[in-house]
Image: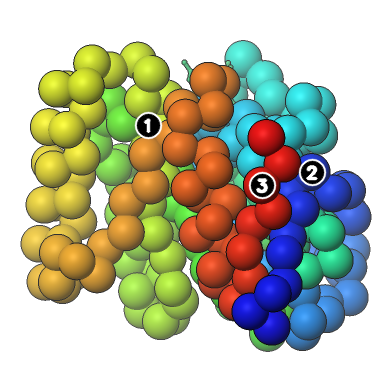
Amino acid sequence: MADKEINFRQTRLLATCAKAGQFPAFDPAKPEIVLAGKSNVGKSTLINALTGIKRLAYTSQTPGKTRLINFFEVDNFLRLVDVPGYGYAQAASTEKAKYSDLTNQYITSDRPLRHILLLLDARHDPGANDWQMMDWLQALGHGWSIVLTKTDKLSRQQLLLRQREIRNIIVSRYSGDEDDLRIHIVAAEKGTGIKDLRQFLAGLVGAKAKRTD
Ligand SMILES: Nc1nc2c(ncn2[C@@H]2O[C@H](COP(=O)(O)OP(=O)(O)O)[C@@H](O)[C@H]2O)c(=O)[nH]1
Ligand SMILES: [Mg+2]
């Protein structure tokens, strides 16, 4: 078990689903790690960076284009699940409800959901939808952590400040211990923080990430 090595470059798109009935059969031996967050926060770019496969997940300048749940299987050991981004302003409210329904159905299903990475743009405080998601994950008792994205857009000083501010507001909302909140720092387009995040994810399933570069 301790020797299990995950090669993130060995990742394939397993399924693209528009409704819950299309979710692939789950495999308890392949725990699922969800990437959630506002549209345009950088979910697809992060998946591409983690796997080193440039166009694995579709990235777009147009917020909200991804309305499907994508399941990626990583080296037969775990799955990354890209859920629809919330807060898609241009969508009709019935459409919005439909897409968040799909995410809700996934999150409340009996799948082997190991962890949720909630992506936040490092430059902004969590929005109403982010809080809703965190409240919900807390209530369901799921393990989750924060990924601050696009950190290359901030100076080192600004980033340290933002990191502290975001930690404070989240920890005070859930009156938790500061050390219990894990905040990952990434700049996916530059590769910053990607190796650490791979190790963290591999650690969640009792493995190590293979060093491929
Ligand atoms: N500067 C910078 N831009 C990023 C980063 N990650 C994503 N982006 C940009 O943000 C936009 C949305 O990214 P995407 O991955 O499609 O977001 P998604 O909607 O959450 O999947 C794209 O234009 C990306 O190029 C990053 O680390 N740094
Ligand atoms: Mg996307």
Residue underneath mark 1: 121
Earlier in the chain: of badge 3 and badge 1, it is 1
Question: Could you tell me how far apart the alpha carbons at marks 3 and 1 are, in whole angstroms?
Answer: 27 Å
Give the numbered dot on residue 211. Answer: 3
Question: Is disc 3 placed on a helix, strand or loop?
Answer: loop
Q: Secondary structure at mark 1?
A: strand
Disc 1 residue crowd, few under 14, some 14–19, many 20+, Cα 10 Å: some
Work out whether 140 lies above or below 91. Answer: below
> Residue 122: x, y in percent?
31, 31
Circle 3 or circle 2, nearest the eye: 3
Report whether 129 appears left or right of 191: left
**Marked residue nearer the N-terminal end (2 or 1):** 2
Give 210 or 139, whichever is nearer the viewer.
Answer: 210
Residue under the image location 14 percent in, 71 percent down: 177
Labelled disc at residue 9: 2
Q: Are marks 3 and 2 in contact (CB under 8 Å)?
A: no
Q: In this picture, is 142 found above or below 132?
A: below
Q: Residues within 10 Å of mark 3 (few under 14, many from 20)?
A: few
Tag 2's secondary structure? Answer: loop
Asked if the residue under mark 1 is in contact with the one under mark 3, i.e. CB atoms within 8 Å, the reply is no
